[in-house]
Amino acid sequence: MYSSWRRHAATNATGIEKPVVGTYPEDSDEASETTESQPHNFPSLEDLESEESSELFDLIDKFRELNLNEDISLPQLVVVGDQSSGKSSLLEGLTEISFPVASDLCTRFATQIVLRRVDSLDTNVRATIIPGSEAANNEVLKELRRFDKSIPQAEFTSESFAEILNEASEVMGLPRPGAGTEGTLTPPEKRFSNNILKIELSGPQHPNLTVVDVPGLFHNATIHQTDDDRELIRQLINDYISDSRTIIMAVMDGKNNLANQEVFRMARNVDPEGKRTVGIITKCDQVQQGDERGVIQIARNSVEKLHHGWFVVKNRSTKDIQNGVTIAERHVKEREFFSRPPWNSLPRERIGIDKLKPFLAHLLLEHVRAEFPRLLAEINSLVVDTERSLQELGETRATPMEQRMYLTRIANDYGRRVTDYLDGRLRDAADMQSPLKIRTLIQNLNDEFGARMKAAGHTRRFKEVDGREEGDDAQSSRHAPAKQDDIYTWIWQIYRNSRGPELPGLVNPNILIEVFREQSANWSNISRDYVSEAMAIVTRFNSEILKRVVVDENVRRKLAANLSRATTDAVNKAYQELSQLLEAEHSGILLTVNDEFARKLDEVRQQRVLGRLRAVQVQPNGAGAQAINALDNLMRAVVLSNEESAVYDIHDVLKCYYHISLKRFTDNVIIQVIEGNLLGRSGPIRLLNTDYISGLEQGELTNIAKEDWQVASTRRELMSRLERAKSAQEAASILSI
């Protein structure tokens, strides 16, 4: 079946742009001659009865029921015209069912009329609603889809049709046709709908044909139709006819000047070459005597040249309806009217409903055949593109289980990345200053911390035994010792002010604790600044890694906010650990089992004695008196006063202990505070884990992981589009077998 459609499409690859049998050349002189001399062979209903055409039209109708026209342009034939143009009467002739005819009637939705050729005479007229895009609410959709009316065709009257229109309007939430809107609170968006009323008819008298009827244009506002309504209808018509796959069936009131009929101006704007427009002239029986020639010239395609030419019809008039003229009688009266001059000068193939119906069916069939391969390609592309768009949105997070699984995957990915970055296994951090190079940044900070503690951890500089200040640490630092007074003087003052009941020459043991505490007072600020800087590195790292792990910005923000309390607790715990280390160094006794302390202290004491001895110049070959003087000098150099001995000893003990304690404290801060707390298992860098996700309460879980309403709305729209496209694919594949 599909291969036959491809063959048809190949012979008419341009679709509606290729003239069909019975159209006119575009030159007006040739058109006049052609209509007089050449025969026009339109297909008969029997020629159009093929199973192929029926199934093909059914497939396009199925696409429209799926609302595929929201995504892809569908081949269609749309009838447009003024309310007074005789459009409804024309449709009545095409369908052979009675349409409600009233000058003040205004339908507020499009009507799709489906004709199918069957052998049975016992058929029904079925009315259903195809929900439009505005019917997003499930309850509204259910209500619209529940609308299903079926009436035997023999019993279908204009009154029953009017009642269907009324009921359909109510289901769509619209005013009834003919109901006034002036002075009401009905907003414009509630006066018209993009839902479609579908009317299905079948019988041996019908070709396979689908026509979409849109509300008619009007020019003067009434109580039933406002100026807003007029603009909305104009926009609705323009939306339909602007579609390049729409064949425009433009209806002209024969008794009115063509230049005054707006629908043709609108058609010309969207189809300037007239390649997809068919003109139909109605009310030919009401044309004033003497004006027939002008109408006939239009019908000959000599005035408004259309690619598919013109047709003339005679519909039932209001008087005919009042007199009970049936539709069958209408056909007879139409044939009789056009058999008389001057109308009989027109080609027979361009006269009457009997010729118009098969022409439209053939035109639409060829149009659908030509477009069908491209249509299938667009459907396939729509599926691929929509699936790609859904992939870019990420996995759905509608249920609690989906939300927890989503966050669990994030936590696992986060944990793997943290481990890699801490171990120095960098993935995407080529920049040396990248926040992701956390191990490098922390190691560099550790070095800076150690250097800062060594250079500025003390409040006063220690002395060498020769009286010089220890080291060359005059480098600038915001933590440089603030006290510039001599350390010996400072120790002597404390010694003098701290004397207790001890004997002269002995040192109060509390003095060492006091001088150490004051000498290491800078440790607190330096170490707290270090922890603060380390925390800043951790914070930047967390922020950067979350950007890579959590694509959804809202989820990332909410996740960080939810973790903030635990992060604060972890940071506080790190500072508590630091406080405990400081307290351990500054409270209680001074304590170390490090052998280095005793070794260094002995070394300093020996150096101090040797230094004093070097200061005494003894003459080895001197006389007795000189030898006695040298011995006196030696004794005075070696034996110090009690206070001097105490000050030097306090200084030397403090110096040896301070350096050992400094190294111990520096290492402990790095290991216990930074590595153990900030970078450890319970630190802020490790909080996002599967245990944390498992412990989230339902409310927290939903608040963090639920999709943003815009993302959710986009996902629903994409899912709906994918469902439409895949359903269309399936329908097409079944038919193509």
Image (cartoon, rainbow, N blue to C red):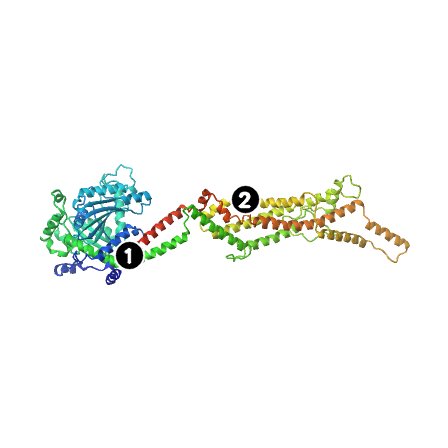
Mark number, residue 702: none
- Residue 722, given in percent of the width and then of the height, sits at 34, 52
Look at discs 1 and 2 and give the one toward the viewer.
1
**Compared with residue 500, is residue 37 higher up or lower down, i.e. above or below?**
below
**Front-lying residue, 189 or 263:** 189
Position of the N terminus, as image quadrant, is bottom left
Asked if residue 366 lies left or right of residue 486, the reply is left
Query: Quick one: label 1, few (<14), some, or many (20+) residues within 10 Å?
Result: few
Q: Which residue carries the number 2 mark?
A: 568
Q: Which secondary structure lies at badge 1?
A: helix
Position of the C terminus, as image quadrant, is bottom left
Quarter where residue 33 is shown: bottom left
- Residue 646, given in percent of the width and then of the height, sits at 77, 46
Asked if residue 268 lies left or right of residue 389, the reply is left
- Residue 687, given in percent of the width and then of the height, sits at 52, 48
Task: Specify the amino acid type for callout 1.
Answer: Ile
Asked if residue 458 lies left or right of residue 724, the reply is right
Q: Please indicate, yes or no, whether residue 154 appears anywhere in the rendered image.
A: yes
Tags 1 and 2 in contact by the CB under 8 Å rule? Answer: no
**Compared with residue 153, is residue 733 higher up or lower down, i.e. above or below?**
below
- Residue 471, given in percent of the width and then of the height, sits at 69, 53
Task: Specify the amino acid type for callout 2.
Answer: Thr
Query: Quick one: label 2, few (<14), some, or many (20+) residues within 10 Å?
Result: few
Q: CA distance from mark 1 to mark 2?
A: 62 Å
What residue is at 72 percent from the left and 52 percent from the top? 595
Q: Please indicate, yes or no, whether residue 290 appears anywhere in the rendered image.
A: no
Q: Which residue carries the number 1 mark?
A: 734
